[in-house]
Image (cartoon, rainbow, N blue to C red):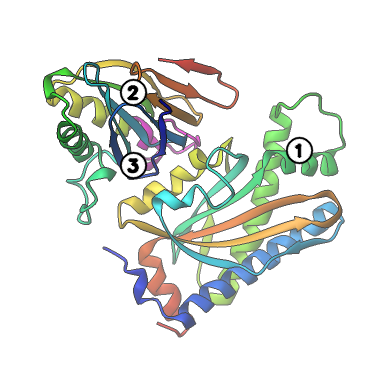
Amino acid sequence: MTANVTKIGMAEVCTANHPAVLVTLGLGSCVGICLYDKTKKIVGMAHIMLPSSKDIKNNSNRAKFADTAVELLITGMVKYGAERRRITAKIAGGAQMFSFSSANELMRIGERNVHAVREELKRLTIPILAEDVGGNYGRTIEFYSENGALGVKTIGHGISVI
Amino acid sequence: MTINYDNLNSIQIDVFKELGNIGAGNAVTALSKMLNKKVNMEVPKVRILEFKEVAEILGGAEIPVAGIYFRVQGDISGNIMFLIPTDSSRILLDMLMGPYRDGNEFGEMDKSALEEIGNILAGSYISSLSTLTDMKIKISVPALAIDMVGAVLSVPIIQFGQMGDSVMLIETQFFQGDTQVKGYFLLIPDVDSFTKLLEKLGVA
């Protein structure tokens, strides 16, 4: 069976049945959240941009924020038949692409995104099995429904599977 | 504050285009002097894009680029970014400093040269806008990232994420004829600067 490859852009979420490959290209300060139900091989990926929907008035797009995208993903996966208690997570991204001498809040957005994602997963008691976060470089990630493997590609910082 | 881009009329879009034209025109002149070669530019495009589309504009989110990024501050605020694909960056550096570099790596010298190129170009871009609008506008020190274009662009885009679900880019492509050096200027004004700019230019 050939897997469908789906690209997920900024502020998007996607859930899929096996066989599927979910891909986000050129992840920078955003964070890719990858959820997996091992038994049913159901996958979900979110590409969040900001830590919290509560700081912002215009927050209708739930896929955009760490504190709303995870629930959105889980709901989608449950519809496909996933079981909440079986869901595990892998995360990647949250880089600081530019280093300004005056490190203001906005420049630390990658770090804040990662922190918010961890908090949200903790709140929902979803274990993080692996992560590749931080640094100052971009990542392309590929998430496979076959085995829940997350491939991480970079320019100049190697390729890995977590 | 939420911006509704649908409210922009075609005259206002044209004004933004003209800003790009004047800004990039000056920057291209500066680049041309620096290289002592003719540099051409295309007609600026004003693009209003959803976030998921942004990374695709240069031909794919994974294209490696040198991104030189500035915060714009003063009477208006926003971001200005130059994106130069890495192969073009190498040619540009060769033209400026001689082909002495080995391999494909960018050394410290290359990086600071790229920042300085960016600095000169952003300076000319912004000073022409400042003159045109009679506003005080200044730029931050440059910050450089050499990486996938999607990752590089995520930084200014995230700022827009706080205000809406789309972003306006004033994009101008430039190229140096015989050597295939090409690049992009992106001016991304903050949302609350839109009205100020439009008012100042009499098309609010």
Q: In this view, does B62 lie to the left or right of A161?
A: right
Q: Which of A87 and A147 is in front in this view?
A: A147
The residue segment tinted magenta is A95-111
Taking the magenta stretch, the answer to whether it contains residue B147 is no
Give the chain letter at badge 1. Answer: B
Residue A25 rendering spot, x and y as whole percentages: 47, 36
Quarter of the figure with the N terminus of chain A: top left
Chain letter belonging to callout 2 = A
- Residue occupied by mark 3: A49
| Nearest to the observer: residue B21 or residue A139 | A139
| Depth check, front residue: A38 or A58 | A38
Q: Looking at numbered disc 1 in the image, what kind of residue is underneath it?
A: Arg
Q: Name the residue under label 2.
A: A145
Q: State if disc 1 and disc 2 touch (CB < 8 Å).
A: no
Q: Position of residue B116 (x, y in %)?
A: 69, 45
Q: In this view, does B82 lie above or below A1?
A: below
| Mark 1, residue position | B90
Query: Marks 3 and 2, Cα distance to the nearest angstrom?
Result: 24 Å
